[in-house]
Image: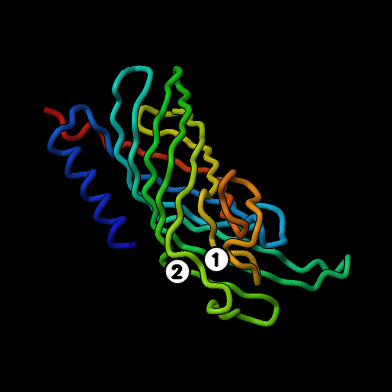
């Protein structure tokens, strides 16, 4: 799956180079705030980073399309609260290589975005107050397909800030002790019950300039 995602990314970039006009490229970096729906803990308490590269084509003054390759951290975190007798600690860390494909509508200095993202899990960690938990008990899925919505504000000719919300179509893993076909779908109409990544992010995009121009 990791090789497949990289191959898709390379194929898209190659096709852009051979047929594109007025493309722009740049770098992105920011913070993620995430939770995992279905893990019994609530709150976007897991902090992480997102970093990568993007290519954008403006089809008109109204709309454009954007393609990205990013490393993105997700997961869940619960800290003990001794004042209420809660001594439970939980930490779930994910690192994904993701390929978002996004459509953007531009209104003056603002733009509104929506799209999808394909991600490949490259590392994970799960632990509690007793230490690391063995993944073999509840294995994680190797890839993820998620939805994207967001808003952008351009505050500099070559820079803009982004607020993005992402929710997974596919689950991180099945429910604890549950069978794939014996659980009710909690969010998507034909989905399966389990754990789903839910992420908000704040990022800064920096544009290198026009590329592939003819």
**Among the two numbered marks 2 and 1 on one chain, the one whose residue lies closer to the N terminus:** 1
Q: So how many labels did they put on this image?
A: 2
**What label sits on residue 132 in the rendered view?**
none
Which residue is depicted at the point 30% across and 25% down?
58
Q: Residue drawn at (53%, 38%), measured in percent from left and top? A: 163
Q: Position of residue 28 (x, y in %)?
A: 39, 45
Residue 181, given in percent of the width and then of the height, sits at 58, 61
Question: What is the secondary structure assignment of the residue under circle 2?
Answer: strand
On screen, 115 above or below 132?
above
Mark 1 is surrounded, within 10 Å at the Cα level, by few (under 14), some (14 to 19) or many (20 or more) other residues, namely some
Place of residue 146 in the rendered image (x, y in percent of width and height, measured from the top left): 48, 47
Image quarter in which the N terminus is found: bottom left
* Residue 19, percent from left and from top: 14, 33
Q: Which quadrant of the figure has residue 90?
A: bottom right
Q: Is residue 100 left or right of residue 136?
A: left
Judged from this view, the residue extending furthest toward the front is 181
Mark 1 residue element: strand
Query: With respect to residue 121, does 209 lie above or below?
Result: above
Q: Which residue is mark 2?
A: 123
Q: Residue furthest right?
A: 84
Task: Check disc 1 and report the residue beneath it.
Answer: 93
Instruction: State yes or no: discs 2 and 1 in contact (Cβ < 8 Å).
Output: yes
């Amino acid at each position: 799956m990791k090789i497949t995602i990289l191959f898709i990314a390379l194929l898209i970039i190659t096709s852009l180079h051979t047929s594109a006009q007025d493309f722009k490229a740049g770098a992105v970096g920011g913070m993620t705030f995430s939770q995992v729906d279905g893990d019994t803990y609530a709150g976007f308490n897991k902090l992480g980073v997102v970093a990568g590269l993007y290519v954008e084509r403006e089809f008109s003054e109204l709309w454009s399309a954007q393609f990205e390759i990013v490393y993105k951290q997700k997961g869940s975190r619960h800290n003990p609260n001794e004042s209420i007798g809660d001594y439970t600690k939980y930490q779930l860390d994910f690192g994904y290589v993701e390929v978002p494909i996004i459509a953007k509508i531009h209104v003056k200095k603002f733009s509104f975005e929506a799209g999808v993202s394909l991600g490949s899990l490259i590392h994970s960690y799960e632990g509690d107050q007793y230490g690391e938990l063995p993944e073999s008990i509840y294995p994680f899925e190797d890839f993820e397909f998620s939805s994207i919505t967001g808003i952008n504000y351009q505050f500099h000719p070559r820079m803009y800030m982004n607020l993005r919300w992402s929710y997974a179509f596919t689950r991180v893993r099945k429910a604890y002790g549950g069978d794939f076909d014996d659980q009710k779908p909690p969010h998507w109409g034909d989905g399966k019950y389990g754990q789903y990544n839910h992420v908000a992010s704040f990022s800064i995009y920096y544009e290198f300039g026009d590329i592939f121009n003819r």
